[in-house]
Image (cartoon, rainbow, N blue to C red):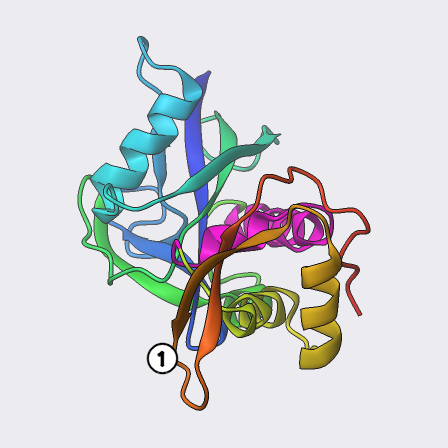
């Protein structure tokens, strides 16, 4: 039995939640869209394998990446080669377009909603893995400061709200959001700088605070 890693790599760009997909360059499912991933080498830790595949198949090796293990998938029919996959969730700030490598014939950012609405578009059981990864990200935004992983090192409250709106696929009242974020201990910390990159009056810049859990949580509408 073979062991592989698959990667649910999410980013937010232009107010949309995007997933990194590849076109498979080898059988099975040659030419079909899939999540990036590959086999674990005998001398590799699972996390090391996930980081290597992220670099080899997409060229996104220099990013600030939040990477965590998602789940294990081992249904007998998931892969004709009888492969168990340990999927990982990766969250990255808005990044440049990926560069395909390894067994990937092409790599691109794809709208998550388009793939969730089309279960047959991804190879293997990658639609299920994608669904699980998106739900993990949506849930963790409620009780952890993980949304900041989608932001640059310094961000505005408005930019943070856009992350929540994109991941949760819903509109959020700006004033209520600002109040909740500013009153949640340790969520964000002011940098002392401002920016006008969103237009209008200068907006304060923040960075992630020391909190590991949000109390009270940021509940989905």
Q: Nearer the viewer, residue 145 or 57?
A: 145
Q: Nearer the viewer, residue 180 or 105?
A: 180
Instruction: Locate the C terminus by quadrant.
Output: bottom right
The secondary structure that dominates the magenta segment is helix
Q: Residue at x 59, y 70 (%)?
A: 161
Can residue 90 be found in the magenta stretch? no
Residue 101 as seen in the image, left or right of residue 167:
left
Q: Quadrant of residue 47?
A: top left
Residue 99 as seen in the image, left or right of residue 168:
left
Q: Is residue 63 above or below residue 154?
A: above
Q: Nearer the viewer, residue 213 or 28?
A: 213
Whether residue 171 is visible to the viewer of this picture, yes or no, is no
Residue 66 as seen in the image, left or right of residue 143:
left
Q: Residue at x 24, y 62 (%)?
A: 97
Q: Is residue 134 above or below residue 110?
A: above
Number of labels in the image equals 1
Please provide percent x and percent y for residue 178.
Answer: 67, 71
Considering every residue shown, the one lying at the far bottom of the view is 200
Q: Residue at x 39, y 15 (%)?
A: 45
Q: Which residue is mark 1?
A: 197
Q: Nearer the viewer, residue 64 or 29?
A: 64
Please provide percent x and percent y for residue 107.
Answer: 26, 57
Q: Residue at x 37, y 56 (%)?
A: 21
Q: Is residue 5 above or below residue 59?
A: above
Mark 1 element type? loop
Residue 54 as seen in the image, left or right of residue 175:
left
Which residues, given as a range, are shown in magenta?
126-153
Please provide percent x and percent y for residue 167.
Answer: 59, 64
Q: Quadrant of residue 158?
A: bottom right
Please provide percent x and percent y for residue 120.
Answer: 53, 61
Whether residue 111 is visible to the viewer of this picture, yes or no, is yes
- Within 10 angstroms of label 1, few (less than 14), some, or many (20 or more) residues? few
């Amino acid at each position: 039995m073979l062991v592989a890693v698959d990667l649910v790599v999410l980013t937010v760009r232009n107010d949309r939640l995007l997933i990194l997909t590849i076109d498979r360059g080898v059988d099975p499912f040659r030419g079909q869209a899939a999540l990036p991933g590959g086999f674990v080498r005998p001398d590799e830790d699972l996390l090391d394998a996930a980081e290597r595949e992220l670099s080899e198949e997409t060229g996104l090796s220099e990013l600030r990446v939040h990477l965590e293990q998602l789940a294990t998938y081992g249904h007998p029919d998931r892969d004709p080669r009888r492969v168990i996959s340990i999927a990982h969730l990766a969250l990255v700030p808005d990044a440049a377009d990926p560069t395909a490598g390894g067994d990937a014939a092409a790599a691109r950012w794809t709208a998550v909603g388009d793939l969730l609405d089309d279960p047959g578009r991804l190879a293997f059981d990658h639609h299920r893995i994608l669904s699980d990864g998106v739900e993990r990200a949506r849930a963790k935004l409620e009780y952890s400061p993980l949304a900041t992983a989608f932001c640059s090192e310094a961000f505005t409250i408005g930019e943070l709200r856009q992350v929540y709106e994109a991941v949760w696929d819903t509109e959020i009242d700006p004033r209520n959001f600002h109040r909740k974020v500013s009153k949640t201990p340790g969520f964000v910390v002011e940098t002392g700088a401002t920016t006008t990159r969103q237009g209008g009056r200068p907006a304060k810049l923040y960075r992630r605070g020391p909190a590991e859990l949000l109390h009270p949580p940021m509940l989905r509408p």
